[in-house]
Image: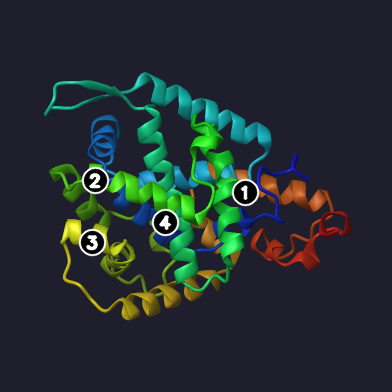
Amino acid sequence: MTDLVVQPPQTATWVVHLDRSMWVGGVRGLMLQALHPLAMLGVWQNSNFQDDPFGRLRRTADFVGRVTFGSPEEAGEIGRRVRGIHKALRIRDPETGRTHRVDDPELLLWVHCAEVSSYLEVARRGGLALTERQADRYLREQRKSAAYVGLHPDDVPGSCAEMAAYFKEVRPRLRVTPEAVSAVRFLLWPKLPRELRLLSPGKPVYFPFGALCYYTLPDWARRMYGLLPEVPQATVTAALKAFRFGLNALPEPMHDRAFMPATRSMLQGARERLGAAGYDVGKGLRGLIDPRRWPKTAAG
C-alpha cells in the first residue's frame, strides 16, 4: 500500500498528522525554530514572514501533508522543489559578515527537529494516546520526511531519547535575537486567512490560540523569550485538550478549509486512491485511524 501514500494508515505518522493539535504544534515549532539565530535570519531574509506569518504555517502544512498523505510522486516533486529553492538561497550574518547556505545540514536538522518534536509533544500532551514505542516509531518514520529536504536519515534523531540528546547538544547555540522576538510577536497575533477565521464558532480572537502555542514551548524556551507572564502548566494542558477536542470534532471537509487549495486537492486525491484500494473513506482520512476501515490485506 506504500505506493498509494507515503505514510499509510498503519503508521504512527498517520495518527499524529491527522490530529488537529497539529495547528498548535506547527506554530509552536515556528516559535522554537526562531531560537536558532542563523535559521531565523534565513527566514527573515528569504521569505515574506513579516507580512504573512500564517502563510508560512500553511505552506509547511502543505509540505507535511504531501510527504505524509501524498503519493510518492507528489512527495518527490515537492522535495525536489524545496531542495532547489534552499540550494539557491543564502543567509547573510551581519555580526560576522559571513554568508551561509540555507541548505546547510545543521540548519535543516534544527528545523526538522523543532518541527517534528513539536508535533509529537503537543499531540501527546493534548491527549493523543501514544506509547513510548509508538512515539519512537513516529520519529523514526519522520526520517523519511527529513530525506525529502536533503538530510541523510541516519543523521536524524529516530527516537525520543535521541531527540532529547539532540536538543541538549544544540541548546548552547540558541539565543533570542530581535528577529526571533519579532517572529514570536507576529505569531501571537497574526492576520488569519479568511478560510481559517471561518472555522471557529463565534470567531473568537486569535490571541488565546497564539498564547496557547507559546505556553506549550519547553520551559527553557519560554524562559529565554520571557514575552508572556507564566501561567500554571496544568491550565495550559487543560486548554490544549479542550482545543484539540473541539477541532477534532469538526467534520473533515470543514477543517480542510484551513488548507491551501492545492493541499485540499492533494488530500482529495489520497482519499480517492485509498478508497479505490479498498479502504473505507466514508469518514474521511481521519476515519482510517480505525483499523476496521482498512481492507483485510492491510489489516493483516
In this rendering, would 125 be left or right of 291? Answer: left
Kind of element beneath mark 2:
helix
**Nearer the observer, disc 1 or disc 3?**
3
Q: Residue at x 53, y 52 (%)?
A: 159
Label 1 vs 3, first from the N-terminus:
3
Label 4 vs 3, first from the N-terminus:
4
Q: Amino acid at mark 4?
A: Ser
Q: Residue at x 28, y 62 (%)?
A: 214
Label 3 vs 2, first from the N-terminus:
2
Q: Which residue is mark 4?
A: 118
User: Residue 267: which disc?
Assistant: 1
Q: Which residue is mark 2?
A: 172
How far is disc 4 from disc 1 in space, using C-alphas? Answer: 23 Å
**Circles 4 and 3 in contact, beta carbons < 8 Å:** no
The image quadrant where one finds the N terminus is: top right
Q: Residues within 10 Å of mark 4 (few under 14, many from 20)?
A: many
How far is disc 4 from disc 3 in space, using C-alphas? Answer: 14 Å
